[in-house]
Amino acid sequence: MRKQMKTTFLTEAKNETISWLRSLFSPTAPTDLIAAPASKRFPANGQTILVVDDDPVFLKATATKLENNGFQVITAKDGSEAIEAARREKPSLLVLDVNFPTDLASLGSVPWDGFRIMSWLRQFDYFKKTPVVMASIGDPVKYTRLAIGSGATAFFHKQMNPSQLLAIVNATLGRSGIVRAPAMESNFQI
């Protein structure tokens, strides 16, 4: 019975996520839900988030979700763009993918990944205490341990409901310390 309830919950969460993503890219989607500037829908909260990911769908979906909830969002698709954007904009929080393909801006000489970006930014005083949420589609147990062990504040598994990322971001900006999504609502447990 419990397994059936968990399977039903996961199926509903997956269907909700797919519907939400389709609505973002649908040509018939109401423009007030997708394209409306965050300042018109929510009061500005003064916090900027840098989202770094090489997957354009995850990047757009995450940026839209955060913007619709009052955050200013900057995006980057590789390590070089991430470093440049972070130093220029000084975000309140970073959402970093774990893995990236070869960085063409550096002609492949710097094998960037989320851990290297975080480590590099931590050399600057401003970023020593900037919270970082690592994200990956890979093994959640492995990457949660690696992310927290490397100094990230939280970890988000990309198969989770996008609303959980928003909850993690809000909790991370609201307090310091390690933040984990509730085990009942996630696809994994630690």
Image: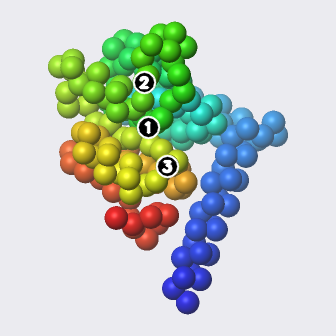
Measured in 3D between alpha carbons, the distance from the residue under mark 1 to the one under mark 2, in whole angstroms, is 9 Å
> Relative to 31, is 169 above or below?
below
The answer to which of marks 1 and 2 sits earlier in the sequence is 1
> Relative to 171, is 185 above or below?
below
Closest to the observer: 145 or 25? Answer: 145
Residue 103 picture location, percent across and down = 51, 18
Residue 165 picture location, percent across and down = 45, 48
Residue 168 picture location, percent across and down = 38, 49
> Relative to 12, is 23 above or below?
above
The answer to which of marks 1 and 3 sits earlier in the sequence is 1
Asked where in the image residue 27 lies, by quadrant, the reply is top right
How many labels, in total?
A: 3
Q: Secondary structure at mark 3?
A: loop
Q: Quadrant of the C terminus?
A: bottom left
Measured in 3D between alpha carbons, the distance from the residue under mark 1 to the one under mark 3, in whole angstroms, is 9 Å
Do labels 2 and 3 touch, CB within 8 Å?
no
Q: Which residue, given by chain and number where applicable, does mark 1 sit on?
A: 98
Measured in 3D between alpha carbons, the distance from the residue under mark 2 to the one under mark 3, in whole angstroms, is 17 Å
Q: Residue reaching furthest front?
A: 109
Numbered mark located on residue 138 in the image = 3
Q: Which residue, given by chain and number where applicable, does mark 2 sit on?
A: 112
Residue shown at 69% from the left, 40% from the top? 24
Residue 82 picture location, percent across and down = 43, 20
Q: Residues within 10 Å of mark 3 (few under 14, many from 20)?
A: some
Asked where in the image residue 104 lies, by quadrant, the reply is top right
Do labels 1 and 3 touch, CB within 8 Å?
yes
